[in-house]
C-alpha cells in the first residue's frame, strides 16, 4: 500500500518507530485502520486483511504488533476503551492459539540461538500472562484442566526458559541495545520472579527462588545489581501462591514437577535468613513480613480434608510476626499520607493486609475465647490505622489495590474479603462438633454463651463495616443472620438453665435491626428466612418481647412483620423474578400456632391463609399450610373456630374431588387437627361434630385403603374428650365411649397398624371421660369393663392411668377404691422399680380428695401423715403441696365437728409459716382461705362473721407480701357472705354480721376484676333474708340486688327460690298469673332471655 495513503500513515509511523525502521507486517487496531505493510509495494489483499484482523483480535487489547522477523513488540496504541471492549467481545480462542503458536515458534528459535531481542519476547509473554488474569474463582485457579490456567502456566514456563538461557553465558538470546547496560539488565529476573508470583502452581515458589538464585550468582557482590529486598518480597509472594495451591488440595500429578513441601515454612525460613544476614540492603521490611504472613494464611486454608493440623501453630506465628513490626508500622501512620513515599505507602498497605490475615486466622484457628480476644485486637489495629486518618488513607489504598470505580465502597478489597471470611468462620465456629451435637450433654447454657459471644462479635464486625462506609452485601447479612439464629436451637431454648428472654431475644432483635437497616435491597428480598424460623421457634418459649422502643410484642408478631416486608419487596419485582414465599408463610403460621394465642392467634392464621389464597404469585397453600392453619384453630379454644375448622376440611374435600388447580387432598393429619380444634373449642355440639369428622375419615379410608387416610388413636382420644366435656348424662357418655373403643379395637385388628394400638393412654382418656359427669351406676360398670379389657390385652397401666383411676374413683365417691388403686400403683413400683410408677404428690392428692369428698377427715389425715413420713425419709416425690392441705381442710369442714374451725385454721397457719420460711410449694392460695372460711361458716360459732373477715384480710396481706396465689377471688368473698348469712348468735352478733356483709358486698361490687356469679347474688339475698327483720327494708334491698342480677344475666332457679322465700312481694311482682304454676313456682322458661343468658344451662 502506498505510504502516502492517509488511512495508513499513522499506523506505518507507529510500527516504524517500534521496530527501528525494519520492514515486516504490522497490524494495528482501531482507531488506527488495519493495514498490510511490506518491504515491496503491493496492494492489500482483501482475504489477507480479514485474516490478519481476525488473528490479532486476542492481542488487540494488549496493543501487540506481530512481526515476521520473530520479534514481538509492544506498541502504544491510543485505542479507546470501547474499541478494546469490542475486540474482547469477539474473542476467538482458535486464532489466539494460532498467535500463541507463533510466540512458541519465535521463543524456540531464540532458545536455539537465533538472533532475537529478549525483552520483546519476555514482554509479549508477560502481556499475554497478564491478559489471562485474574482468575476469579477457586474453581478457575485450582483446576489444572482449565485452559486459561494452562496458558498462564505456559507463559510463566516460557519466560523462565528465556531467562535461564539469558543467564547462561554464551546463550543465544541477547538483550536489545535499547535495554543494554545499567540496571535494565536485571529486568528479565524481576519480570520472571513477578510472573511466578502470579501463577497459581504448587511449585511457583521454588521456580521464583531459582530465578532469584541465578540473579544472585551472577551479580552477587555488586551493590548496584545484586537482588534487592523487593525481589525477595516477590519470591515470598510466590511461596504464598504455592501454599494456596497446597491448601485447596490441587493434585500434584497434574504438574510435571513435584510440588513444594510446606511452602509456608520455606517463606518463614527465608525471612529468618534475611534477618540473620545483617545486610543493610536486605533488611526485611513491613512488606516482607506481610508476604510471609500471607503465605502462612494461605497454607492454613483447608479443603478436601487437607488440613495438616498445624493451623493453630501458623496462627500464633503470624501473631508473633505482626507484633514484631507493630512499632515500625505505627510510625508509618504518624505522618500525613500525602507526604509519604510510594514505598512507605506500600508498607502501610502491607501492614493492613497483614492485620487482615491475622484477624482471619485468629477467628478461624484459635480456641474461641482467645480467637475473639486476638481477633478484636487486630481488628482494632485495622480500625485505628486504616480508618483513623479521616478520608485520606482509604481512597489512596483503594486506588493502589485497583479499586478505582467511583461507585465502589471506600473499604479496601482485602478487608472486604476478610470480613466475609471472618463471618463465615464465626458461623463455622458456632456450629462446630462440640456445640449442639449431643442433646444429652445438658450443656445448653454453655452453648448459649458460646454462640452469644460469637454472635456479638459478628454484629460488631458488621457495624464497623457500616461505619467504614463499606457496603455490607446480602451474603454477609445472611451469614450474620444464621449465626444469631443458632441461639434458637431447640437444645438451648428448651433448657431450664438458659435465660432465653435475657440472652437469646436481644441477639435476634439486634440482628433484625441490622437487616432492616441494610442498604442492599436483596437482604429484604432474599433474607429474613432464618430470622422468621427463629422467631417461630421462640413462640412457644417466650410470650412477650420488649422491643427497643419500649413496646411489647410477641415472637409471632416479629415473624409476621418480616414476612410483610419481604412480600412488599417481592411484589416490586417482575413476575418472573419473584420468589416463592410459601415456606416463609409456613414459618409465620408455625409461630402463631406455637404462640397458642387463642382466638387472636387463630384470626391471624386465617388472615395469612386468605393472603396466600388471594396472592398465588408469591405463595400457594399446600398440605403443610392447611395443617398449620388447623393447628392454630386448635389452640383458639373458641366455639366459633369449630365451624371454621369443619368448613376448611369440607373445602379441601370438595376442591380435591372437583380436580381444581392447587387443590389439596385432606389427609388423616388434617382431620386430626380439625377434630382437635373442634373438641377443644367448647362448642355445644363439639362431640357430635368431631365424631362426624372421624366417621367421614373412616369412610374415606375404607373406600381408598390409603394409609394417608388412616386415623390414629389420638383422634379417638380427642373425640372421647369432646364427649367427656359434653353436658349429657354419664350413661350416654359411657355408651358412646364404649362404642368408640370398640371401633378402635376393630380398626386395629383389621389393619394391624401401630397408630391404632389401644394403649394405656387411650384407656386413660376413655376412663377419665366417663367419670367427667355425676356418678351413675352403669357408667361405673362400663368403666370397670374397660379395665377388664385392658387386663385381657395385657396392657399394664402407667402412672398417668393410675392417677386417672384414683381421680375417677374419687368422682364416683368411692374413696376405698381410690386408695386401692394407689396401693396397686405402689406395688407395681416396688416390683418393677420403674420410675414412672412411683407414686407422686399428685397421686396422693387424688386419694386424699376422694376421702375429702365424703368428709372422711380421719383417712385424709392418715394419708397426709404417710406422705410426711416418706418425704422425711428422702422420697422427694411425695412432698405435700398446697393442694394436699386444701383437700384436708375441705374434708374437715365437710365432716363437721366442734373443733373443725380450729383445726382448719391451724393447717392454714402451718401453710403460711412454711411459705414464710421459703417453701413455695405450700404457698396458701385463695382456695385455701375459702375452704377455711367454709369450715367456719358451717360451725355454730357466734363470731364466725368476724373470723371470716379476718381470714379475708389475711389473704389480702399475703397478696401484698408477694403471694399472687392468695389474691381474693369471688368465691372467697361469697364464702365470707355465707358466714355472715348464717350467723345465729345474739342481736349484736347478727348486727355485726350484717355490717360486715354490707362492707364485703360493697367491696365486691366496686372491684371490676371480681367476676360475680349466680351463687354470690343468691348468698346476698340470704344475708338480707336472715339478718334483716324489717320486711319493707328487706324487700327494697332484695329488689335492688335482683335488678343487678338480671342486668348481668345471672338469674337462676335457686336464686328465684331464695327471692320467693325472703321477698315474696318482689317475687310475685315479676309478672302476671301466666308466669306462675298452680303451686306458685315461676315458669323459668318464660323469663326474658337477657336475665338468664349467663346462667349455666339457660337459653342462649
Image (spheres, rainbow, N blue to C red):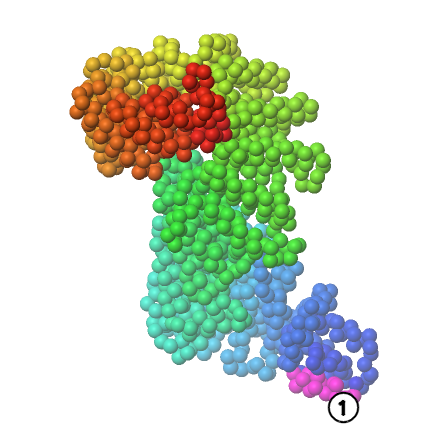
Q: Which residue is mark 1?
A: 4
Total numbered labels placed on residues in the image: 1
Whether residue 379 appears in magenta in the rendering, the answer is: no
Residue at 44%, 26% (x, y): give it.
1071
Q: Position of residue 461 (x, y in %)?
A: 42, 58
Q: Quadrant of the N terminus?
A: bottom right
Q: Position of residue 918 (x, y in %)?
A: 23, 32
Locate residue 642 relative to residue 1080 in the image: left or right.
right
* SS at badge 1: loop
Q: Quadrant of residue 277?
A: bottom left
Locate residue 808 relative to residue 656 in the image: left or right.
left
Name the residue nearer the viewer: 584 or 299. 584
Q: Position of residue 249 (x, y in %)?
A: 54, 51
Name the residue nearer the viewer: 1047 or 341. 1047
Locate residue 66 relative to residue 597 in the image: left or right.
right
Observer able to see residue 934: yes
Observer able to see residue 915: no
Q: Which residues are magenta?
A: 2-18
Whether residue 11 appears in magenta in the rendering, the answer is: yes
Amino acid at each position: 500500500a502506498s505510504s502516502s495513503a492517509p488511512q495508513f500513515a499513522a499506523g506505518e509511523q507507529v510500527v516504524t518507530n517500534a521496530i527501528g525502521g525494519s520492514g515486516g507486517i504490522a497490524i494495528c487496531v482501531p482507531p488506527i485502520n488495519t493495514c498490510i505493510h511490506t518491504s515491496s509495494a503491493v496492494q492489500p489483499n482483501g482475504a489477507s486483511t480479514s485474516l490478519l484482523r481476525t488473528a490479532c483480535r486476542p492481542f488487540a487489547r494488549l496493543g501487540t504488533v506481530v512481526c515476521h522477523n520473530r520479534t514481538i513488540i509492544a506498541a502504544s496504541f491510543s485505542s479507546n476503551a470501547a474499541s478494546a471492549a469490542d475486540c474482547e467481545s469477539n474473542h476467538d480462542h482458535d486464532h489466539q492459539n494460532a498467535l500463541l503458536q507463533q510466540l512458541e515458534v519465535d521463543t524456540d528459535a531464540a532458545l536455539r540461538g537465533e538472533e532475537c531481542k529478549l525483552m520483546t519476547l519476555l514482554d509479549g509473554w508477560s502481556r499475554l500472562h497478564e491478559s489471562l488474569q485474574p482468575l476469579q474463582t477457586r474453581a478457575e485457579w485450582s483446576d489444572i484442566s482449565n485452559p486459561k490456567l494452562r496458558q498462564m502456566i505456559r507463559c510463566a514456563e516460557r519466560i523462565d526458559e528465556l531467562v535461564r538461557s539469558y543467564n547462561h553465558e554464551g546463550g543465544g538470546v541477547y538483550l536489545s541495545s535499547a535495554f543494554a547496560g545499567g540496571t535494565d539488565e536485571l529486568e528479565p529476573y524481576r519480570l520472571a520472579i513477578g510472573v511466578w508470583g502470579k501463577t497459581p502452581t504448587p511449585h511457583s515458589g521454588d521456580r521464583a527462588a531459582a530465578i532469584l538464585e541465578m540473579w544472585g550468582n551472577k551479580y552477587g557482590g555488586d551493590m548496584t545489581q545484586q537482588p534487592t529486598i523487593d525481589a525477595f518480597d516477590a519470591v515470598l509472594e510466590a511461596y504464598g501462591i504455592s501454599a494456596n495451591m497446597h491448601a485447596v488440595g490441587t493434585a500434584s500429578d497434574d504438574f510435571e514437577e513435584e510440588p513444594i513441601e510446606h511452602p509456608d515454612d520455606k517463606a518463614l525460613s527465608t525471612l529468618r535468613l534475611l534477618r540473620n544476614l545483617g545486610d543493610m540492603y536486605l533488611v526485611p521490611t513491613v512488606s516482607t513480613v506481610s508476604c510471609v504472613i500471607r503465605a502462612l494464611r494461605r497454607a492454613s486454608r483447608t479443603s478436601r480434608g487437607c488440613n495438616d493440623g498445624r493451623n493453630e501453630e501458623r496462627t500464633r506465628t503470624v501473631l508473633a510476626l505482626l507484633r514484631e513490626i507493630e512499632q515500625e508500622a505505627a510510625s508509618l501512620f504518624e505522618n500525613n499520607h500525602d507526604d509519604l513515599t510510594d514505598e512507605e505507602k506500600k508498607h502501610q498497605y502491607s501492614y493492613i493486609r497483614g492485620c487482615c490475615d491475622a484477624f482471619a486466622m485468629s477467628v478461624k484457628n484459635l480456641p474461641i475465647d482467645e480467637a475473639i480476644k486476638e481477633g478484636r485486637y487486630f481488628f482494632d489495629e485495622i480500625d485505628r490505622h486504616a480508618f483513623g486518618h479521616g478520608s485520606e488513607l482509604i481512597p489512596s489504598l483503594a486506588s493502589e489495590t485497583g479499586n478505582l470505580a467511583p461507585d465502589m465502597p471506600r473499604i479496601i478489597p482485602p478487608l472486604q474479603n476478610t470480613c466475609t471470611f471472618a463471618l463465615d468462620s464465626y458461623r463455622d465456629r458456632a456450629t462446630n462438633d462440640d456445640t449442639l451435637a449431643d442433646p444429652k450433654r445438658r450443656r445448653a447454657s454453655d452453648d448459649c454463651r458460646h454462640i452469644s459471644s460469637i454472635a456479638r462479635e459478628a454484629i460488631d464486625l458488621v457495624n464497623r463495616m457500616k461505619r467504614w462506609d463499606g457496603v455490607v452485601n446480602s451474603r454477609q447479612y445472611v451469614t450474620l443472620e444464621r449465626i444469631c439464629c443458632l441461639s434458637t436451637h431447640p437444645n438451648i431454648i428448651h433448657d431450664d438453665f438458659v435465660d432465653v428472654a435475657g440472652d437469646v431475644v436481644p441477639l435476634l432483635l439486634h440482628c433484625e435491626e441490622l437487616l432492616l437497616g441494610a442498604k442492599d435491597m436483596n437482604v429484604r428480598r432474599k433474607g429474613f428466612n432464618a430470622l422468621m424460623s427463629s422467631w417461630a421457634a421462640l413462640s412457644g418459649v417466650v410470650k412477650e418481647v420488649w422491643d427497643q422502643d419500649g413496646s411489647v410484642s410477641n415472637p409471632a408478631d416479629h415473624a409476621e412483620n418480616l414476612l410483610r416486608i419481604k412480600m412488599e419487596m417481592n411484589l416490586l419485582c417482575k413476575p418472573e423474578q419473584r420468589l416463592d414465599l410459601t415456606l416463609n408463610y409456613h414459618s409465620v403460621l408455625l409461630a402463631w400456632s406455637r404462640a397458642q394465642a387463642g382466638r387472636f392467634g387463630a384470626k391471624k392464621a386465617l388472615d395469612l391463609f386468605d393472603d396466600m389464597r388471594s396472592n398465588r404469585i408469591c405463595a400457594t397453600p399446600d398440605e403443610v399450610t392447611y395443617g398449620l392453619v388447623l393447628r392454630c384453630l386448635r389452640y383458639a379454644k373458641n366455639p366459633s373456630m369449630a365451624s371454621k375448622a369443619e368448613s376448611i376440611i369440607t373445602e379441601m374435600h370438595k376442591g380435591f374431588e372437583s380436580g381444581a388447580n392447587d387443590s389439596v387432598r385432606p389427609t388423616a393429619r388434617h382431620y386430626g387437627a380439625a377434630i382437635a380444634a373442634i373438641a377443644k373449642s367448647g362448642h355445644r355440639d363439639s362431640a357430635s361434630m368431631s365424631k362426624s369428622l372421624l366417621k367421614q375419615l373412616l369412610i374415606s379410608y375404607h373406600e381408598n385403603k390409603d394409609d394417608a387416610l388412616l386415623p390414629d388413636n389420638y383422634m379417638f382420644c380427642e373425640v372421647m374428650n369432646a364427649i367427656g366435656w359434653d353436658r349429657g348424662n354419664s350413661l350416654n357418655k359411657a355408651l358412646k365411649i364404649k362404642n368408640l373403643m370398640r371401633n378402635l379395637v376393630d380398626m386395629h385388628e383389621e389393619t394391624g397398624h401401630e397408630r391404632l394400638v389401644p394403649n394405656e393412654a387411650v384407656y386413660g382418656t376413655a376412663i377419665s371421660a366417663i367419670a367427667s359427669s355425676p356418678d351413675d351406676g352403669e357408667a361405673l360398670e362400663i368403666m370397670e369393663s374397660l379395665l377388664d379389657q385392658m387386663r385381657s390385652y395385657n396392657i399394664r397401666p402407667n402412672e398417668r392411668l393410675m392417677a386417672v383411676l384414683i381421680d375417677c374413683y374419687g368422682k364416683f365417691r368411692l374413696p376405698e377404691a381410690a386408695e386401692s388403686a394407689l396401693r396397686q400403683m405402689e406395688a407395681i413400683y416396688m416390683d418393677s422399680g420403674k420410675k414412672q410408677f412411683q407414686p407422686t404428690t399428685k397421686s396422693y392428692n387424688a386419694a386424699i380428695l376422694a376421702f375429702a369428698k365424703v368428709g372422711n377427715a380421719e383417712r385424709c389425715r392418715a394419708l397426709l401423715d404417710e406422705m410426711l413420713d416418706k418425704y422425711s425419709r428422702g422420697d422427694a416425690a411425695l412432698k405435700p403441696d398446697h393442694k394436699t392441705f386444701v383437700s384436708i381442710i375441705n374434708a374437715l369442714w365437710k365432716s363437721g365437728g366442734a373443733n373443725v374451725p380450729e383445726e382448719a385454721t391451724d393447717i392454714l397457719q402451718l401453710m403460711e409459716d412454711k411459705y414464710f420460711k421459703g417453701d413455695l410449694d405450700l404457698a396458701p392460695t385463695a382456695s385455701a382461705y375459702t375452704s377455711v372460711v367454709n369450715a367456719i361458716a358451717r360451725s355454730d360459732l357466734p363470731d364466725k362473721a368476724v373470723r371470716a373477715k379476718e381470714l379475708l384480710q389475711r389473704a389480702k396481706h399475703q397478696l401484698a407480701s408477694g403471694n399472687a396465689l392468695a389474691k381474693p377471688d369471688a368465691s372467697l368473698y361469697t364464702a365470707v357472705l355465707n358466714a355472715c348469712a348464717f350467723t345465729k348468735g345474739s342481736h349484736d352478733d347478727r348486727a355485726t354480721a350484717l355490717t360486715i356483709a354490707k362492707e364485703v358486698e360493697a367491696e365486691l361490687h366496686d372491684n371490676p376484676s371480681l367476676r360475680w356469679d349466680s351463687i354470690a347474688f343468691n348468698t346476698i339475698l340470704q344475708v338480707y333474708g336472715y339478718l334483716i327483720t324489717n320486711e319493707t327494708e328487706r324487700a327494697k334491698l332484695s329488689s335492688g340486688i335482683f335488678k343487678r342480677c338480671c342486668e348481668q344475666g345471672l338469674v337462676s332457679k335457686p336464686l328465684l327460690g331464695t327471692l320467693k322465700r325472703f321477698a315474696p312481694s318482689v317475687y310475685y311482682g315479676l309478672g302476671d298469673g301466666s308466669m306462675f304454676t298452680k303451686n306458685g313456682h315461676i315458669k323459668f322458661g318464660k323469663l326474658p332471655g337477657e336475665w338468664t343468658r349467663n346462667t349455666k344451662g339457660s337459653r342462649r
